[in-house]
Amino acid sequence: MKFLDEKIIALRNEMRDQERHELAQQQAALQVEQEPEQDEQEDLQEVDIYQHVITIDDEEVQVMEQSLLDGKMKIRMPKLFSIMSAELASLKYPSERRPNLIYTDTSSSINLAFNLTPHRLNEEGVAGFQENMMDILEQAQPSADWLDTEVLTIDGKTVGFLEVITPAIDGEIFNLMFFASVEGRALIGTFNCMEDDLDTWRPIARAMMESLQFASSEEKGGAVL
């Protein structure tokens, strides 16, 4: 009888050890699940693009509000950007279907482009258009690293966006692409930089996108404010 009691006690101890082991595994798994969320929050540190000055790589940079595409929309951006020359645009975007408007920094490695395409697109079709663009990118870039995708409301309009890192000859490229309906046509906006600049520029790119303002059909003009 004593031997049986000892076996029961030993079995209980084994069960307790197993429970402790399983609990430790669950806690470790939960920690692993939470870590990417914490990293994501760090990556998406908010930038107040409505300030007159923001800090980029420890330097204070002025912010301007820029009118785009003959006054069809406005965006806030750092004053590091200027319109890319036609010669450089033809080199960086060799296709004749290059964006209508391309901004770049002094190094020509940080780019912000806008293309108001002839493709007809209404407000209700923006989410479907975004999904089609994702399908095209997944087929064209099967090794791409997808970071985020969402459909937002910005200035009262539906805007879909995606964030993805794609391979290139000279390194990995971070891309933020956003889509909207402007005057019944598909607008494709693109921000890109080297992955090495991701931590600095990803939150700025998101803030620029979220600062978009869309003109009503009555509004005209293209002055820089």
Image: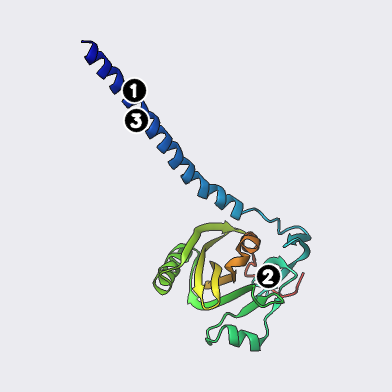
Residue 141, picture quadrant: bottom left
Q: In the image, what residue type sits under mark 3? A: Gln
Residue drawn where x is 68% and y is 70% of the image:
219
Between tags 3 and 2, which lies in front? 3
- Answer above or below: position of 110 versus 123: below
Q: Residue furthest left?
A: 1
Residue where numbered disc 2 is placed: 219
**Residue 79 shows in this picture:** yes
The residue to which callout 1 is attached is 13
In the rendered structure, are the residues bearing label 3 and label 1 in contact, judged by CB atoms less than 8 Å apart?
no
Mark 2 secondary-structure assignment: loop
Image x and y of residue 100, in percent: 60, 80
Inspect the image, locate mark 2, and give the three-letter code of the amino acid beneath it. Answer: Glu
Label 1: state its secondary structure. Answer: helix
Q: Earlier in the sequence, mark 3 or mark 1?
A: 1
Taking the image as drawn, is residue 181 in sight? no
Residue carrying label 3:
18
Residue 21 shown left or right of residue 123 in the figure: left
Q: Position of residue 14 (x, y in %)?
A: 32, 26
